[in-house]
Image (spheres, grey):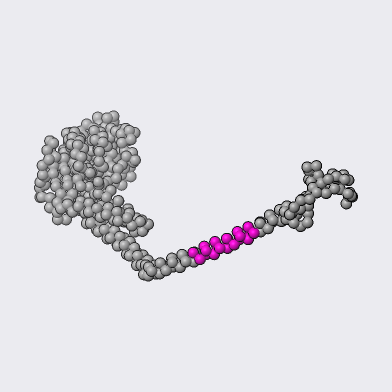
Amino acid sequence: MKFEEAVSRLEEIVRVLESGDVPLEESLRLFEEGVAMARFCQRLLDEAEGKVAELVEGEIRPLELEGGTALEG
Amino acid sequence: MAVLSVRELNHYVRRLLEQDRALQEVAVIGEVANFRAHPSGHLYFTLKDEEASIRAVMFRSRRERLRWLPENGQSVLAIGRVSLYERDGTYQLYVDSLEPVGVGSQYLALLERKARLEAEGLFRADRKRRLPVFPRWIGVVTARQGAALRDIVTVARRRNPGINILVAPALVQGAEAPASIVAALNALYARPELDVIIVGRGGGGKEDLSAFDDEAVVRAVAASPVPIVSAVGHEIDVTLVDFAADVRAPTPSAAAELVVPQRSEWVMELAVCRERLQKAMAGRLERLRLQVRLLASRRVLERPEDLLADARQRLDRARIGLAQTMRSSLNGLRLSLAHQAAKLDALSPLAVLARGYAVLHAEGRIVKSVRNLALGQEFTGRLSDGSFTGRVTHLAEG
């Protein structure tokens, strides 16, 4: 699943639950699904440090830029 | 005759030239010769025809709008003004704009290419795709050295430290650039993990962006399986890949900003969603608890024996009612029966006879009329308690 699909689904679930038009069993099911969606998104957001690599002649190698790839603004 | 300094003389002639309106905007056709691109960014060349030549200069500020460089031997149309450079007395054409003239010129070929590719539908607005909301892997095609790649990587990682970047380096200018760019793009297209691609190079007035007008490069960009952002040159430069890409960014840094979202914003958005989720669920459960409490407080649940007493009472009443109904039914039947019996009784012939009537038989038949009797005829009669015989002695009607 893609991040944006999960976010859309989560927002939809929140809207439905807030409207209150759902029977209890359905509410509980939706709540669980919402929690799962939120966890999935959080996992993607939590990826600490991404890779920077270069593709040369079919091979992937880490990329070192002159001056480094420092994160200071 | 006044004696002038050289400076004064040159100044005078310059003033003379600048006073002539016709010389302030001239259009000249000629062939380029002695072309030199100065490090300062100014272009110096000679414009000539069979019989004459004139020095020409195109300053950096003007030439920044040019996306091509004149070549010796090329036919051009130069528009500018004529003046004198006082310092050395050079009479020259100060060129404001330059256009190639003649068949097969680069510029005309470019226009033709653009029209052709546009007619094929490669630049259609409905082909443009939206950028992914939160890409995990981005691909980059640009020069291995230089500010463009550095800027992209820096900006991308600042916005989202978790972003993964795959770079396919390419030559971005020179004769081998188009093939190199196409190969790099195709190498990235084979990687299914990429969510979006940036293709471009740094810009500025001096840079040759013609590789990004190349037909093969434009077609390759249009064929990208994922959304692709062109980041070629500088704010004002537009190349054909800009039309073929899904999104155009004015610079490589801007491209990184468009492609990589600010992670902290999403973290906040997610936190808000989670809170709304919790609150909505908690609210629901609270409402239910309230409902249950209300129901539990009703009499039914607090004193269940009352319910039983009610039921018993109803049962008793029903029993009494039933009995009463049955009794009255029975009485009714009895009455009815007696009534019918009485009726029956009244109709019985014995009862009639008991009232003083007799049944007469003559010649084996019941006598119902005096006309059926003759004088002297014998008859038998029956009363309620016996029978008798007799003879008719008198007949009269009425």
Nearest the viewer among B13 and B296 is B296
Residue B22 is situated, as x and y percent measured from the top left of the image, at: 33, 42
Nearest the viewer among B152 and A35 is A35
Q: Say if residue B249 shows up in the picture.
A: no
* Quarter occupied by residue B24: top left
Residue B179 is situated, as x and y percent measured from the top left of the image, at: 19, 33
Main secondary structure along the magenta-highlighted residues: helix
Who's the residue at 18% across and 36% down the image? B187
* Quarter occupied by residue B298: bottom left
Residue B305 is situated, as x and y percent measured from the top left of the image, at: 38, 69
Q: Say if residue A43 shows up in the picture.
A: yes
- Relative height, residue B349 to residue B80 (above, below): below
Q: Is residue B13 magenta?
A: no
* Quarter occupied by residue B28: top left
Nearest the viewer among B364 and B48 is B364
Who's the residue at 34% across and 59% down the image? A18
- Relative height, residue B347 to residue B128 (above, below): below
Residue B56 relative to residue B323: left or right: left
Residue B376 is situated, as x and y percent measured from the top left of the image, at: 87, 45
Q: How many marks?
A: 0
Range covered by the magenta-colored residues? B319-338
- Relative height, residue B90 to residue B179 (above, below): below
Who's the residue at 10% across and 50% down the image? A67
Who's the residue at 88% across and 49% down the image? B393
